[in-house]
Image (cartoon, rainbow, N blue to C red):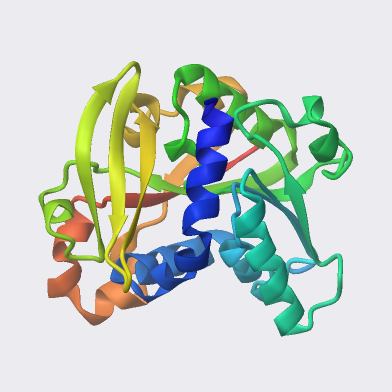
Amino acid sequence: MTTTDSERKQYDGVASNYGSVEDLPCSEIEAQLIRTALGDCTGLSVLDLGGGSGLHARRAIDAGAACVDVVDISVEMMRIGQDIEKQLGRDEGTVRWITADLARPLGEQDAAAGGVREGGYDVVMANWLFDHATSVEDLRAMWGNVVGYLKPGGKFLGVRVQSIRAEYMKYGKYGCTFTDVKEIPGGLGYKCNCLTQPPFSFDCTSMTETYTLADRIPKGLGLVGFEVVKPEETEVAKGDAEFWSDFVADPNLTVIVARKP
């Protein structure tokens, strides 16, 4: 079975439960970090790579984005997102859905090449995408899609795993655990367990390049101005500094922003 088949099947399998992660503490702080990173998106075009059911796409629309194109490998995740958009009564075309393997260049895939905007996007998001790169080559292709479709002067933002071995990730203080951590060529493989009701799990792979925030690949492709959105400045962390102290000291997830000159 190919990596493409594996990723599609594991997310198709958890799609019906995935929305429940919004109730977890880690998702609450993630949402605030993403909103901060997005800022004012009034009138902007957004490309959401690995956007799944469109959770962060909807946040971009709430921030004023004119349109968001979601690209994902899981048809079932995107079907759920389409159902949500229908329930919201949003104009068709505000959020569009494109099936593609983001570990390959989008321009080489017929469905994606016919769907993504040739002129590029003002904002490109890649939330959790890089934590499914099974090799440095995958990671390079993913970043190639980010940079290739980002307009000059445009903003990149994305959430990723950072501290895989944080002590609190062994017992799920913030709503999920990482287990079965093992070394793989170029990085670490592990299982992410979401402590929802019912709980569910999926496999992840993070390259050392990603979780150490080295980011040599995107910097080599021309992105500049890399910054970490500070979790201690979110309202949720300020509201309960004691509870969030472990996360602030050693975050298991981080949101990065950068720009294309």
Picture coordinates of residue 226, whole percent (x, y): 48, 40
Picture coordinates of residue 203, whole percent (x, y): 37, 41
Q: Relative to residue 147, is residue 158 drawn left or right?
A: left
Give above or below for 33 relative to 107. Answer: below
Residue 199 visible in the snapshot: yes
Residue 40 visible in the snapshot: no
Q: Relative to residue 130, is residue 114 drawn left or right?
A: right
How many marks can you see?
A: 0
Q: Residue at x 50, y 35 (%)?
A: 6
Identify the residue at the far front of this view.
1
Q: Residue at x 20, y 38 (%)?
A: 180
Picture coordinates of residue 23, whole percent (x, y): 37, 76
Pick the residue in front: 227 or 136.
136
Q: Relative to residue 102, is residue 67 drawn left or right?
A: right
Classify the position of the C terminus by image quarter. Answer: top right
Pick the residue in front: 197 or 216.
197
Pick the residue in front: 173 or 259.
173
Picture coordinates of residue 164, whole percent (x, y): 24, 42
Give above or below for 220 relative to 17. Answer: above
Q: Residue at x 20, y 79 (%)?
A: 240
Give above or below for 95 relative to 71. Answer: below
